[in-house]
Structure formats: C-alpha cells, structure tokens
Amino acid sequence: MIKNILICGVGGQGTVLAAKVLAQAAILDGQNVLSAETIGMAQRGGCVTSHVRICDRNQEIFSPLISQGQADILIAFDASEAVRNLSFLKKDGTVVVNEQIVQPTTASLTGKVFNKNDYLSFLKNQVKNVISVDAAQVCKELKSSKIVNMILLGAASKTGLVSKEDLKSALKVLVKPEFYELNVKAIDWN
C-alpha cells in the first residue's frame, strides 16, 4: 500500500526539511520512498510543496509526484496553504494543519486581512479528519520559532504514518547535533 503525503507551506517555514525527515524516517523503518519538491518562488516567500510517497519494501513507486485527489495526508504549515492544496487530498484523507496564516503581500497592499478562523472552518466543513495545531503557542512554550516543521510531523505521527521514534532517528541523520534536542521536544509535544 502506498501512502501519499503532500507537505505545503511558504518559503522559509521548513517544509523541505520536514519532507526529508519524513522520508528518512520511512527509510529507517525499511520502506521505499520517493519524494520531490516544488520550490520555485520559495526564497521570495512563495508557495512550497513537497510530495512524499512511501510504500512497503516489496512494492515499487514509479513517480514521486502525487496526483490530485490521491494524498492520504496533507501537512500544511499555514491554514491558507491547506485550503489551496485541498484538491490533492483523498476523500477520506487527513489534514494536519498549523492554525496560523502567513498574510500574503496582496493583503498588505489592499488592506484586507485573511482570517485564520475562516480557513479552519472551511477545512473542517470539507474534511472529516482534521488535526489542527496551534504551532505558534508550542513555539512560544519551547522558545523557538524554527520548529513548526517538527511540531507538525509529531502531530502527523498520530495517523500511524511513521513513529515518533523513527522521526527522532531521522533527525540524528539530518540535523546538527546542537539542534537535535529542541527538535525532539517539538516532535514529542503532542
């Protein structure tokens, strides 16, 4: 069985590292993985999506990209990005969403403010399985704004996607030792 995970956010939020940690965790668990990122405008605060496809060792995956309507899990670093990428989610899929919204440039130009509650309500009306996370509050508690990615991966582990232990093992491979403990606290937060 193939598990399709789409990770989405805005450049600089850590979506690419989250995809790498998720892929490494699955590999450490003995699974096959293909992944790809679309990061075109990421350095300018643009949209970033990472496709991660995981399957058992005895199966094959032929493309790293997830087709519309095929994602089992959508991990969104921003509520508006969750809505924008909702077409990728399967009918019975799960959304793991950070409750925050990065206000787009157009909002500051027009004076319009995007309300996170509108986006979260929309998601909950459209999707049966929504795991909503107030990552800003967790970041405040753990005294770092750079751990949203691990907070969301920890929340996604509740779906049975990967274990928290495999995520922690992946961190040992991918992050500098001085950041390991903080990232582990983020994964274990929930």
Image: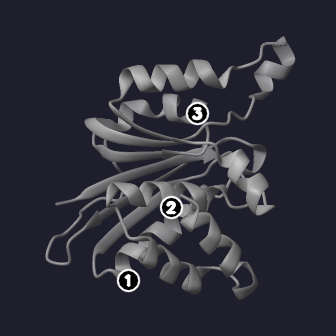
Tell me the quadrant of the picture where the N terminus can be found: bottom left
Few, some or many C-alpha atoms within 10 Å of disc 1 (few <14, some 14-19, many ≥20)? some
**C-alpha span from label 2 to label 1:** 17 Å
Few, some or many C-alpha atoms within 10 Å of disc 3 (few <14, some 14-19, many ≥20)? many
Residue that carries the numbered disc 2 in the rendered image: 154
Residue that carries the numbered disc 1 in the rendered image: 28
**C-alpha span from label 3 to label 2:** 18 Å
Is tag 3's residue or tag 1's residue first in the polypeptide sequence? 1
Is tag 2's residue or tag 1's residue first in the polypeptide sequence? 1
Is tag 3's residue or tag 2's residue first in the polypeptide sequence? 3
| Residue at the spot 55% in from the left edge and 67% down from the top edge | 188
Q: Which mark is residue 123?
A: none
Asked if labels 1 and 3 touch by Cβ distance under 8 angstroms, the answer is no
Q: What kind of residue is marked 1?
A: Leu
Q: Could you say which is closer to the camera, residue 68 or residue 13? A: 13
| Residue at the spot 46% in from the left edge and 26% down from the top edge | 123
Image-quadrant location for residue 142? bottom right
| Residue at the spot 51% in from the left edge and 29% down from the top edge | 84
| Residue 70 position within the rendered picture, expressed as x and y whole percent measured from the top left | 27, 42
Q: What kind of residue is marked 3?
A: Ala
What secondary structure is marked by label 2?
helix
| Residue at the spot 59% in from the left edge and 58% down from the top edge | 151
| Residue 33 position within the rendered picture, expressed as x and y whole percent measured from the top left | 33, 70
Q: Is residue 88 above or below residue 20?
A: above
Q: Is residue 71 left or right of residue 38?
A: left
Q: Could you say which is closer to the camera, residue 160 or residue 50? A: 160
What secondary structure is marked by label 1?
helix
**Image depth: mark 2 or mark 1 in front:** 2
**C-alpha span from label 3 to label 1:** 30 Å
Q: What kind of residue is marked 2?
A: Gly
Q: Is residue 114 left or right of residue 169?
A: right
Residue that carries the numbered disc 3 in the rendered image: 79
